[in-house]
Amino acid sequence: MPRTKGDHEARRRDVSAAVWQVMATRGFAGLTLRAVAAQLGATTGLLTHYFPTKRALVAYALDLLEERTLARPRRTSGTGLSSVRDALLDILPLTPEATDSNRIWVSSWDAALSDPELSADYARKYAGSRDRLRERVLAAQELGELPPGDPAQIASAAQAFVLGLVVQALFDPAAYPRDHQVELLDAYLSRLGGSAGRA
């Protein structure tokens, strides 16, 4: 009996879940066809139907990670500076799911840096994030909650700050628990010229 499109999509969802589980437990370096096949309870031969090469698996894993990151529920506590704060809080590893996502992102940087095409794709992703943040910064400036200045530069500095905080929190979670991450972010936002509320 021929396989239907529904069967193919269901199997692809199963493969996606297995790829995600491998990345969450082993990091990006542990992402291999063999590991995914073992997680799926299948053969590597079956997986080559979906991923003929390791690079195809890596590219798919990065797309899956972006998809899951964008699909996560987002904070929406207001406009202006509150909206900037929400966007930055959404990046931080404040929940187990956000911690897993950030661990995978950070562990994937090595693969991306060693592949020009993946590196360009990462640059595009981070630029898109900065553009979205710039729009929020501009709205906060228009409300008088942030001082005048180049909103693109402010967004770039804020992204750099929060990504640095992500890395520190991942490597030393005892020194950077949830509340301390939020305190540091609020202090940063306060120095930008606005007031930030509590998480």
Image: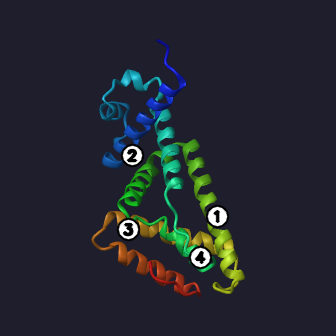
Q: Which is nearer the N-term, disc 4 or disc 1?
A: 4
Q: If the image is split into quadrants, where does the C terminus sit?
A: bottom left
The label on residue 78 is 4
Q: Amino acid at mark 3?
A: Gln
Compared to 77, does 30 lie above or below? above
Marks 4 and 3, how far apart at CA: 28 Å
Q: Which is nearer the N-term, disc 4 or disc 2?
A: 2
Marks 1 and 2, how far apart at CA: 27 Å
Q: What residue is pinned by disc 2?
A: 28
Q: Amino acid at mark 1?
A: Arg
The number of numbered badges drawn on the structure is 4
Q: Are marks 4 and 2 in contact (CB under 8 Å)?
A: no
Q: What residue is pinned by disc 3?
A: 168
Compared to 44, does 123 lie above or below? below
Front residue of this view, candidates 161 and 102: 102
Marks 2 and 3, how far apart at CA: 18 Å
- Residue count near mark 2 (Cα–Cα under 10 Å), binned few <14, some 14–19, many ≥20: many
Q: Which is nearer the N-term, disc 1 or disc 2?
A: 2
